[in-house]
Amino acid sequence: MNLRTLAWKSLRSRRSTALLTVISISVSVLLFLGVERIRVNAQSSFANTVSGTDLIVGARSGSIQLLLYSVFRIGDATNNISWDSYQTIAKNKQVDWVIPISLGDSHRGFRVMGTNKAYFEHFRYGQKNHLSLASGKSFDGIFETVIGSEVAKSLNYKIGDQIIISHGTVSTKFTEHKDKPFVISGILAHTGTPVDRTVHVSLAGIEAMHINWQGGSKKRRIVRELTEENLQPESITAFLVGLKSRVKAFSLQREINDYQAEPLLAIFPGVALHELWRLMSVAEKALLIISIFVVLAALTGMLAVSLAGLNERRREIAVLRSIGASHWQIMSLLITETVLLTLAGISLGIAMLYIFIFIAQPYIEANYGLFLPITWPSSRELMMVSLLLIAGLLISLIPAYRAYRNSLIDGMSARI
Amino acid sequence: MTSNTTLATPLVRLTDVEFSWQANAKPSIHSGQLTINQQEHVFIQGASGSGKSTLLNIIGGIVTPRKGHVEVLGHDLLRLKKIPRDRVRADHIGFIFQQFNLIPYLSIIENVILPCRFSKVRERNAIQRSGTVREEALYLLNRLYSTSTPDFNKPARELSVGQQQRIAAARALIGQPQLIIADEPTSSLDYDAREAFLDLLFDEVRASGSTLLYVSHDPSHKHLFDRVIDMSSINSLSS
């Protein structure tokens, strides 16, 4: 029986307080690592949302706003841009490809995006991955739709199902385009980006369902033949631009920003993403600070429990001294106990983190579009828990020193 | 006080030791020359507060007097550094206190074995006698519990005070330390238990050839001992 076993048996004899201490530390570790996990994954998923696009063009507003509605499907555009402007820029000789984006409708909480086949061909995310279909095919007809993986999963849709699209981004029964149901022609493979939560239709489809509408309400029914030609949109919300040579990106950006016919804004996605992340980092830092304080609270709790127990243990320590334990061994016993508690707390906290990720993974992805993969702890996380362990070790010196002082006073004859 | 010293070897020798708890107070211990010889059974008598515990703490190397010379088994305790001083206590002295002798969260057998975990010397002695430390502990326990044997894996805290004192005796005796110091070991026992305990203690001390230093305020057992020292002779407060 060495000091470690002695410490272990001593802790086991006080198992209810020891367990509570371990739980409070593990909860703080869970919070601490959880915040770190979400931060890192949010950052990488942010950066992965769009790649290979050189410019995003929309109506003049803020660059973050444009990025948010065109790529993240968050918020709404203040204004549309005309089809003519889109056509003009698309025909610029620097431009390799363009992807039009037309927003403003939704289906059961998921945003509907009007686009064309260029989207499936040119849109890229993550490490320049192309979109691929998990099943079915891209939309051909006006009333066909391709849905993201998350849409299919959470609404349990399959190829051939009919869906009704609502006008506007808030779903109300009064504003459904009930007269024009769409048929699901394809389901995209999982990307871990907002694409998963998007319902894609053709620009013609967007026009078609709005034919009898004006200003957000139904108009008198006008029967008109729906063909691709007469469904030419007058305006779109934004478009993504790929250039033949990235060197020309700055000059084209200036050209678009100075566009005479209407006020336009062109942004570099990377720059805007960085700006957006900087904005988010305030919240991220606040969370980190809070979790550090929770960790400190847990460590203080452990210290309080350890110090409170010390008085009851004066006799025990005096007995150990009489048997021949040195001051150093008494201090080691208390240090070992505290370090064991911290270690147990950290281990339980990490276990809880993985259980939490495992359970909450689908929920977080469905509600916040953030995919948390189950991966080994990162070196940064390991460094964080090591720091916590060192903090536990430093804190253990306080009861250890107090026990040393007590044993100097008590000798072998503490009578409690 | 120097009666038996001519032939016997001294085990503990205190020379002009002065000790006081406060730095400038009058010393509460004033030993003069105090010698305890090997295999001697010495009774130290004194009222409570007469400095008995302090004396034992000095011999155990737990407190250091400000003056004088303390020799235990040939070791000059005051010259030794802290760790070797603790080592002398661990290797050569077994303590029995009035009560609360045991580590409450350890089992009976673990409590008895404990000194062998702090002292290689006592571990070696135990192994030499019984093969393993555990066997030696069981041997001592069985001797102390000749009639009814409790479950030795039971936690110490579940035992009565009388039973705890027997475990404490077994622990003090394991590994045959040369010096057994008993500080009021029977004061929390009733009369019958007291007699039985003392018989066992004397048997074991004789069997292992140890020296016994027995401290009590109660003079009723002093006839069992080779020599009686009155605390007042080494304590300036009551002199």
Image: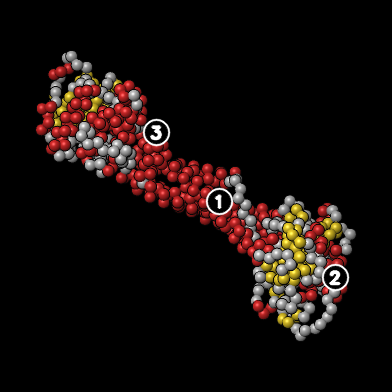
Residues at discs 2 and 1 in contact (Cβ within 8 Å): no
Which secondary structure lies at badge 2?
helix
Three-letter code for the amino acid on which mark 3 is drawn: Asn
Chain at tag 1: A
| Mark 2 to mark 1 CA distance (whole Å) | 52 Å
Query: What residue is disc 2 on?
Result: A84
Compare marks 2 and 3 and give the one earlier in the sequence.
3
Labels 2, 1: one chain: yes
Chain at tag 2: A
Q: Is residue A220 above or below residue B33?
A: below
Q: Residue at x 38, y 47 (%)?
A: A15
Residue A395 seen in this snapshot: no
Chain at tag 3: A
Q: Position of residue B24 (x, y in %)?
A: 24, 35
Query: What residue is disc 1 on?
Result: A354
Three-letter code for the amino acid on which mark 2 is drawn: Asp
Labels 1, 3: one chain: yes
Image depth: mark 2 or mark 1 in front: 1
Which secondary structure lies at badge 3?
loop
